[in-house]
Image (cartoon, rainbow, N blue to C red):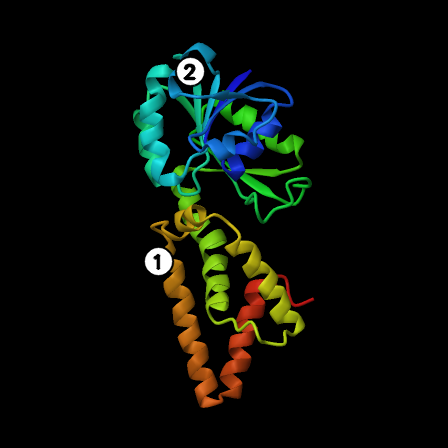
Amino acid sequence: MKIAILGAGRMGSWLAREFSKGHEVAVYEKDSAKRTKLERVRVLETLEELAPFGPGLLVNAVSLDATVPVFHEVEKYLPGDCIVADLASVKGIVAGYHRGSPFRFVSVHPMFGPTFADLGSLKEENAIVIKESCPEGTLFFRHFFEELGVRVFEYSFAEHDVMMAYSLTLPFICSMAFSACCNTNTVPGTTFAKHMNIAKGLLSEDDHLLAEILFNPCSIRELEGVTARLEYLKHIIEEQDQEELKSFLQRMRNNIFPGGRP
């Protein structure tokens, strides 16, 4: 299959390398420095070159705020039977585009950041394919991810954004709160060191990606939940309330160990 990828950031360039092992791949990237790092792919100098290339699949790997405008910009260069794909971490905006687009689409979300994950071994990682995607696009990405050992889940557009606020925003804001309070002169204990490694991984990600996750409209509810529980914990500590602390700890254990504490 001929596959065109728009954007050669961390995820776009990784997909280009993987797809080039079995497909003819062309990549368009505005940044000349990123273009020089691409191997085994055709580099497009202009979007107009998409027309003669004639992709069967177009993967839009630009930042979330640019995704829909770029789709509109390239539509006129695509064959009518092309499947368009997005990798957006928040689906609300792109869902509206796809519903009004004449092209078949597949909407996916690799749940592994190119910085944080070990891209050489993805067996413990997850990816989401949106239920409303076309059967051909779903089959392609499901096969692609499963060949890499990635677990694939299917959610609707609406279900996805609610799920992402919980599974991404919640740990992100906890790590960001930790990072905001860090003192580099601290002698770390084991737990501190583990949190520090997680925070370093998170803050090594691209700012645009972090913003996409945090600006999910469903994120505020998760943030309010965290701040409410921190205020409750603050009250317990101020009052030195042993019984209430014991009860609070038990509720947390029930959340983490639903089958009982090991």
- Which quadrant, please, contains the C terminus? bottom right
Q: Where is residue 113 in the image (x, y as percent from the top left)?
A: 54, 45
Whether residue 22 is visible to the viewer of this picture, yes or no, is yes
Q: Is residue 258 above or below residue 112?
A: below
Whether residue 91 is visible to the viewer of this picture, yes or no, is no
| Residue pictured at 37% horizontal, 49% vertical | 216
Task: Return the residue nearer the eye: 40 or 209.
Answer: 40
| Residue pictured at 55% horizontal, 64% vertical | 255
How much space separates mark 1 and mark 2, taking CA atoms? 42 Å
Residue wearing tag 2: 49
Left or right: 232 with respect to 154?
Answer: left
Residue wearing tag 1: 220
Tell us which disc is closer to us: 1 or 2.
2
Would you call the spot at circle 2 few (<14 residues within 10 Å), some (14-19), or many (20 or more)? some
Would you call the spot at circle 1 few (<14 residues within 10 Å), some (14-19), or many (20 or more)? some
Task: Return the residue nearer the eye: 40 or 109.
Answer: 40
Q: Is residue 112 above or below residue 31?
A: below
The local secondary structure at tag 1 comes to helix
Q: Where is residue 10 in the image (x, y as percent from the top left)?
A: 53, 39
Q: Amino acid type of disc 2?
A: Glu
The answer to which image quadrant residue 120 occupies is: top right
| Residue pictured at 50% horizontal, 34% vertical | 33
The local secondary structure at tag 2 comes to helix
Q: Amino acid type of disc 1?
A: Ile
Q: Where is residue 110 in the image (x, y as percent from the top left)?
A: 53, 39
Q: In this view, does 170 lie above or below 62?
A: below
Q: Please report contact status of discs 1 and 2: CB closer than 8 Å, yes or no.
A: no
Task: Return the residue nearer the eye: 179 or 104.
Answer: 179
